Image: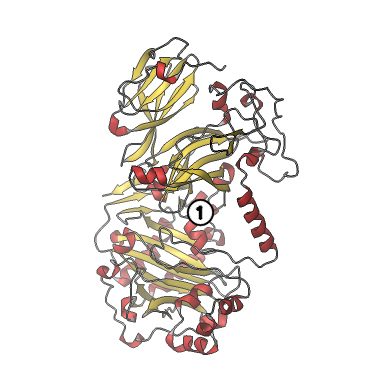
Amino acid sequence: AGFSAPPRAEVRALRNGDAHEVVRRGDAIYIVNTRGGSIVRAAVPREGDKDLQVTHTFPHWSRADHLNQVALVSDTLLVNVHARGKPSHIDGVNLNGSGEATLVAGGVGTQAHGLAIWEDCRDDGSGRRYLINLNSGQGGVGLLPLDGSGPYRTIWTGKDGTFTKGLAVVGNVAYFGSSKSGGGLKSRLEVTVTLVALDLRKALTPGLDAVVFERELPFTGLLNQILSPHYLPSAPLPGPPRERRALLGHQQRRPGNAKDPQELRAVQPEFLGAKPMTMEPISRSDGKPYMPPGWRVPEDGIMSALWNPKIAAKEKAEREAREKGRLQQGSFKANSETAGVPQIKKVGRDSRTAMTAKGRADKFDAAARELWKTEGMDPMALKLGMSTDQGTIATDDEIVSVAYAPGRDRVTSEAMPLRAKEAAVLDARELNDVYRDRGRVAAAAGMTRALAEIAAPEWWSRDYAAEHNAVLVGRESFMAKFKKNVQAIIFKFSDRQGSHVYEFPWYEDFRAPLKAVLDELGLDESKVSRMQLARMPPGATIKLHVDNGGWVKSAHRIHVPLATNDRVVFMSKIKGNMHRMPAQAGAAFEINNKAPHAVFNRGDAERIHLLIDVREEPPVAVYKLRKGEQCNYNNLPDNVECGVRISG
């Protein structure tokens, strides 16, 4: 039931506190005293109260823990511990027991905010209860099964440099704010904020686009809280009482929008019955309308409250243009593994006409294409030639005809100096800057035989690997954008810095043939930070990118081609142009992956390379992953529950 609180000025809650959130349980409220590092329990304030009647304090934390959000699950109060610069974690306090705080989950992101309970109820009676939080420091959303059936994992990550804050879960949709991260107080007050709606059921499956919508909000600053409907019954509403309206049915649908997610069409009746409602927005002092607290869901559904006529008109025009095949889509932006790379622009189907319209036709005329065979391909032409869904400026034959880099007769077999990887993007002047010949590897044939004998075709499937090997989540957006259709069998992988290494279960199946390859190349197995098989089926493309992160600077990247064909084109940038790199089956080579590079398979056979990243010093620690284990790449190595430490 709702209650009427006295004016804010008449109740002193925390004289020396910094309260982030308050939740109610029966006749008590629980206040997050962030500055004091405690949770304060007090009686619900009544008319005439001038001071909060504190009944108990849970003093288990410190100011450095920076408590922010809490959530109630039966008799347990879940407490989000931000931890300021350290990995965040969630504690639990038994309200009917000793009141001691116990660790519920560690490694739940960095600078974490928000706690919400999601009931994934299925028609067949199955489903689970999950805890949802915001991995704010990495711009993500995290999920933890409350039945202990799996570890915490990040299920959605925004673009690099974003910060998530403000969380509510309604039905199967999570709503939260996304803003640009960093900066001081002034920048945090002026930053643009976007409201994101995420379909949680879709987000459970890595690789699916689970975003329902993204809407820029009409104000600036971080989004601190979103009130879901179950908070509103106890919220004091401004203004005179308004007429109660008929309740919406649980399954009421928006007219003419049967395909919309159910969560955007339906509201639980109990969320609507304890508050005044209105169908009309109220005018603000500046004349703009807004929906007040306690608003009734309009007949057109929740989405109509977020409707913006300008956005709607733009989206309608884009839809109509797409249907006619005339939409010219925007540019990709560099992400965490492509920092410093110029944008890759998609063009319309008649791309050469589009270039003419922009006054660039002379740059890619027939004469320029002939020069590709001797001088290498212009990077602009390469980028335009990589748009596989909107047409290309270069045919497959033109890509295959691009010239090999000059100087193959002068390539050294010495290891690439790691200091050559210090630049954000390498400005290579000759082939030796990006490519080193590591010689023929007789043991590559044994590795190829082992692959045919041990690995069934389904081993290349990520879903199969999730059950029988192990998987790292958190890199799906990068893979989908730059390495779509490229498959992998992973034996070893490192964190972003390359200092903590994780062995996958399938490494044991291939240990002998892999060791034979490493021994022949003179590589120390204990210094290998990443090792995997990468498969490109016919027609696949690895788009132009630059590898980024500490793992790149600390290791040599070696390729051992196991299967290829003469229409596989591996390109890297030298002297301003993209040149083809030598790559023959059984002949190992090292590349500098700080140079922009791309790969095309324009043949009718698959391309499989064994990729090895080897450090000059042993890693800090090595962990062994368990069969079926899923770990969040963005949380490594802070997620102490990921794998079993076997060395270091």
Q: Of helix, strand and loop, which one carries label 1? A: helix
Q: Nearer the viewer, residue 504 or 498?
A: 498
Q: Nearer the viewer, residue 614 or 224?
A: 224
Residue 319, located in which quarter of the rendered image? bottom right
Apparent side of residue 244 relative to residue 408 in the rendered image (left or right): right
Question: Quick check: can you spot residue 151?
Answer: no
Residue under label 1: 465
Q: Residue furthest right?
A: 256
Q: Residue furthest top?
A: 48
Q: What amino acid type is highlighted by mark number 1?
A: Ala
Question: Quick check: can you spot residue 67?
Answer: yes
Apparent side of residue 633 relative to residue 128 in the rendered image (left or right): left
Residue pictured at 34% horizontal, 49% vertical: 623
Q: Nearer the viewer, residue 212 or 435?
A: 212
Q: Nearer the viewer, residue 329 or 379?
A: 329
The percent coordinates of residue 115 (x first, y second) are: 46, 33
Residue pictured at 36% horizontal, 75% vertical: 589
The percent coordinates of residue 130 (x first, y second) are: 52, 35
Q: Residue furthest front?
A: 286
Q: How many marks?
A: 1
Above/below status of 89 relative to 25: below
Above/below status of 340 relative to 113: below
Residue pictured at 41% horizontal, 45% vertical: 190
Above/below status of 359 relative to 633: below
The percent coordinates of residue 470 (x first, y second) are: 46, 51
The percent coordinates of residue 314 (x first, y second) are: 62, 55
